[in-house]
Structure formats: C-alpha cells, structure tokens
Amino acid sequence: MAQHTLSVLVENSPGVLARVASLFSRRGYNIDSLAVGPTENPEVSRMTIVLNLEGHALDQVSAQLFKLVNVIGIQEMKSTNSRQRELLMVKVSSSGNRNEIVALAKKFNGQIVEESSDSVVVEAVGTSKDLASLLTEMGKYGVKELVQSGLIAIEIGDTTLAERTLQETGLATSESHSQTEDYQN
C-alpha cells in the first residue's frame, strides 16, 4: 500500500471531524495521521489526513469525502509539490548527558523547551523521517514521554488550496459557503 496525504477544506462547524472520521471507520480504513486547524478564513478549517491506501481505494475515499455536505475541497499533497512537517516533543532522562542532548537537538533543528533536575524536553519540527531519526538517537537517553502531532502540509507555489478548489469546483469561497445550510446537524 502507498501512503497518501490529503488536505481537506471543511466548514468550521461542530460535528464535521466526527463525520469525516466515521466515514473512514465505516469503510475499515485506518487513519495514520490526522491534523485539524483553522485557516485564514475563520469559517473554514483544514484537515490533513494521512492514509495507506491503493489508488482505487483513494479515489473511492475522495469521492465519499466530497459527498459530505461540510466538505469544500480535497487535494492530495504529494511530497514533490508540498512541504510536509510534524511537531515532536520528547522528554528524556538528562542524568549527566545534558550537553549531548542539546547537541543532538540542534543537529535536528530542535531546542530544549523544558528542564528539570532529572529530565529534558526537546521540541523539534521536521519531516516524519527526520523526527524518526531523532527519536532513534534520543532512545539511548531513555524516553520518558513522547508527544507527536499529525502531519501538516502546504502546497509549494503561489496558488492556495482554496483557490485551486475554486478553480476546479467553483465551491471554495466563504461567500458561497455562508449560504449553504448544514443539513447534517
């Protein structure tokens, strides 16, 4: 199976996340990563969903997603035409190794965001591969706690996802969606 990253513009209203997640659940697909947040338009949220699917299944998922009333637009974010990042915060034991941990964090463009007598919290932003490498190296210090965000992605170039959606479907303006009632609530 291949990994696919979908950026989905949705109306910013209660219950949308539950409807999108249940669509995947009903079809037996596992979501590897899910990040949701506001966009430049307060009426629109953006979901970044990472899935492991074959091509035909991806087409089916996209079609089913687009049928949801609250979905404004969908775009696959390929690694060749987008920037993709995750946030990692990891708490490790610092007993006598603080300088080594600081050097390791800097190697991966991370920083120390919290220190106590026995532990250090490292924060790093990077690709999934870079963060996995950082975690592997941090393992020798004893990982006490780990928090990692879902993947987020933004397309390279001047065109925005909202503009691309408007060009392809004619649906992505806040004016057109403010008139659409949410029939699923």
Image (tube, grey):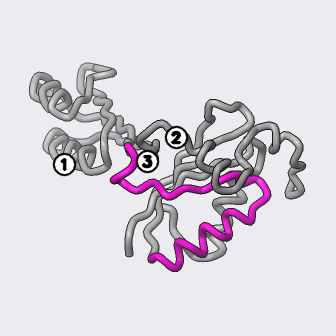
**Mark 1 — residue?**
136
Q: Contact (CB < 8 A) between labels 1 and 2?
A: no
Distance in Å between CA atoms under marks 1 and 3: 19 Å
Q: Nearer the viewer, mark 3 or mark 2?
A: 2
- Residue carrying label 2: 159
Tell which of 80 and 19 is nearer to you. 80
The first of marks 3 and 2 along the sequence is: 3
> Could you tell me residue 17's position as x and y percent?
68, 52
Coordinates of residue 145 in the picture (x, y in percent): 34, 40
Residue extending farthest to the front is 167
Dot 1 or dot 2: first in sequence order is 1
Give the left or right position of residue 72, taking residue 157 as reference.
right
Where disc 1 sits, the SS reads helix
For the point 74% across and 36% down, the residue is 43
Q: In the image, what residue occupies the spot 62% across and 43% down?
A: 162
Q: Which residues are magenta?
A: 54-83
Image vertical order of residue 158 relative to residue 63, above or below: above
Q: Secondary structure at mark 2?
A: loop
Disc 3 secondary structure class:
loop
Which numbered tag is attached to residue 151? 3
Amino acid type, mark 1: Thr
The verdict on residue 103 being magenta is no
* Quadrant containing the N terminus in the rendered view: bottom left
Q: For residue 163, which quarter of the picture?
A: top right
Q: Is residue 113 above or below residue 54?
A: above
Q: Which residue is found at the position 43% from the left and 39% from the top? A: 157
The CA distance from mark 1 to mark 2 is: 37 Å
Q: Is residue 15 left or right of residue 150?
A: right
Front disc: 1 or 3:
3
